[in-house]
Image (cartoon, coloured by chain):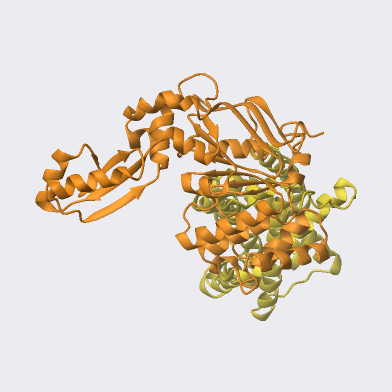
Chain colours: A orange, B yellow
Amino acid sequence: MVTGNYAIEARGLRKTFGDLTVLDSVDLRVESGTMLGVLGPNGAGKTTCVRILSTLLGADGGAATIAGHDVMKEPRAVRRVIGLTGQDTAVDELLTGEENLVMMGQLFRLGGAASRRRAAELLGRFDLTDAARRPVKTYSGGMRRRLDLAVSLINSPPVLFLDEPTTGLDPTSRTVMWETIRSLMAAGTTVLLTTQYLEEADQLADRVAVIDGGRVVAEGTAGELKREVGSERVELTFDGEDLARARTLFDGEHVGVQTLSMPIESPSDVRGLLNLAASQNLDVKGFALHEPTLDDVFRTLTGAGSRTGAATAADADGATGAGACAGAGAITGETA
Amino acid sequence: MNQAVAPKARPEFVLAVGDCVVLIRRSLRHLTRNVDEVIQSVVLPVMLLLLFRYLFGGAIQTGGPSYVNYVIAGVIVVSIAFSASATAVGVADDLRNGIVERFRTMPMFSSAMLVGHVVSAVLRNVLAVTLVVLVGLLVGFRPSASLGDWLVACGLLLLFSTAISWLATLLGLLAGGVEAAGGYAMILVFFPYASSALVPSESMPSALRAFVENQPFTPIVNAVRGLLIGTPTGNSVMLSVVWWLPVLALTVIFTVRYFRRHTGE
């Protein structure tokens, strides 16, 4: 029943809303027991993709299977094997955490006793036992997300969709969420995670697909993407007069009012930059080393998006010059 | 962890009923935790009764029974229509919240969510009507109804309440948001005021009177009033069924269809 070893497989998914093409032709494959991070800016089509794969939305073209079940032809079979945690917490605010879990278990037809057992187990695992009898509306943002994830796991689904599970969370809650997701991976769950944060994909995913303008523009491991897509950058901060002089000295772009950002080939290049500053009596007030960011990835890859077919990370090489696709515009330009 | 927990093998219909029971229980829990909703659906009807009994009661001539006896059927119908607002808001809130999305990714009978809202709305009405009748008895309501009359009146009100609750559910689905849902439901609240619920239609100008005597809220008011205090029912019992049974049937069909299409099933 399962085609190949892919728990999630999508071929040529298309979706349009009126004149707007949200998904052009999306191909995704996730091997059983691994995590694919789907990375993209707002409006890239990430959520639409997840909605189609989780049977919430019909596609206009293409095909997809989850654990061998056709998403369009056997939605019920698909629903039995998936869990979904969306961007909005989909739990009942007036019920307690425990009541939410038990209710969802019963709706999965696990029966009352089994639902209560599973609820207790998940509450413990997600550190919600103390809050189990409180209405969800009293929960913090992090607790809500954890409960939402717990609810998605009530039927122990072999395939899990996490649609921006940490968007809007504070750093501590995010780290806790990451730990939880890692423990799921250890248990053998197949996960498709969408995120706007390269770091998140980097931390969690086995492979990353970069999606933009309704297409997969690059696919590979996080390390491959970063190497192919952007270089490390160093940021130097100067005060008043020094800033004006530094601007003429360094060929950097402004990030923030007093900070210049420059690409470097390797960390040892930093020595040269600092020596240059010292030789000119420039007082360096701040210093930071930056890994490639999602911005870098997108500046580079949106150029690759116009080419036909799903480019691989290696293909993206030739598109490095596309940095001209001026930053923020390319990143937040679309909606839907 | 590699296999989803298998559901117990039972006929689909039984499972669907089970889903309804689970979601009815959910809606009832809401009732116990949402003080505003309880006030709106239970306390308000009683206040309405006292308001009409003592504030307007002296000024309105019914041409027969005392005003408290006249108005009780009206207050019952008005309060059932009133609860439509809470129902529509509840449905719209579920859509906004994303819980409906979750239900739709589950192998369940997702329309059970609608059933949950309707059943809890009807139970809310039963509670409110019971309270209105009890308080009514304290302030001068003297029913002349036989057991049979009571049963027929309750049957009609149950039909009416179910139909109104499905209509409210539909409005909640159609409305673009929680506020809009509350607003649309006000349409349902308006109708009983323009019926024979609170004042006899004989006192109205002819154009209004023509509307009042031919709109669906008037027969239900007249039927319940006649059954409870013995005023002539005429054909109002039959008319109530003729109006509200098709309204109920069509609304259920349309609402469930709309919900399923809207939710891509």
Spot occupied by residue B78 in the image (x, y as percentages of width and height): 61, 60
- Residue B70 occupies which quadrant of the picture? bottom right
- Residue B84 occupies which quadrant of the picture? bottom right
Q: Residue at x 20, y 47 (%)?
A: A275
Any part of residue B161 in sight: no
Any part of residue B139 in sight: yes
Spot occupied by residue A252 in the image (x, y as percentages of width and height): 23, 39
* Left or right position of A121 against B207: right
- Residue A234 occupies which quadrant of the picture? top left
Q: Where the C terminus of chain B falls, by quadrant?
A: top right
Residue placed furthest toward the right: B10
Which residue is at the front of the view, B146 or A5? A5
Which residue is at the front of the view, A325 or B98? A325
Q: Residue at x 65, y 60 (%)?
A: B80
Q: Residue at x 71, y 54 (%)?
A: A187
Residue placed furthest toward the left: A241
Q: Residue at x 20, y 53 (%)?
A: A284
Which residue is at the front of the view, A2 or B46? A2
Residue placed furthest toward the top: A308
Asked if B192 appears above or below A270 in the picture, the reply is below
Spot occupied by residue A33 in the image (x, y as percentages of width and height): 70, 45
Q: How many marks?
A: 0
Asked if B126 appears above or below A223 in the picture, the reply is below
Spot occupied by residue A52 in the image (x, y as percentages of width and height): 63, 35
Which residue is at the front of the view, B260 or A71? A71
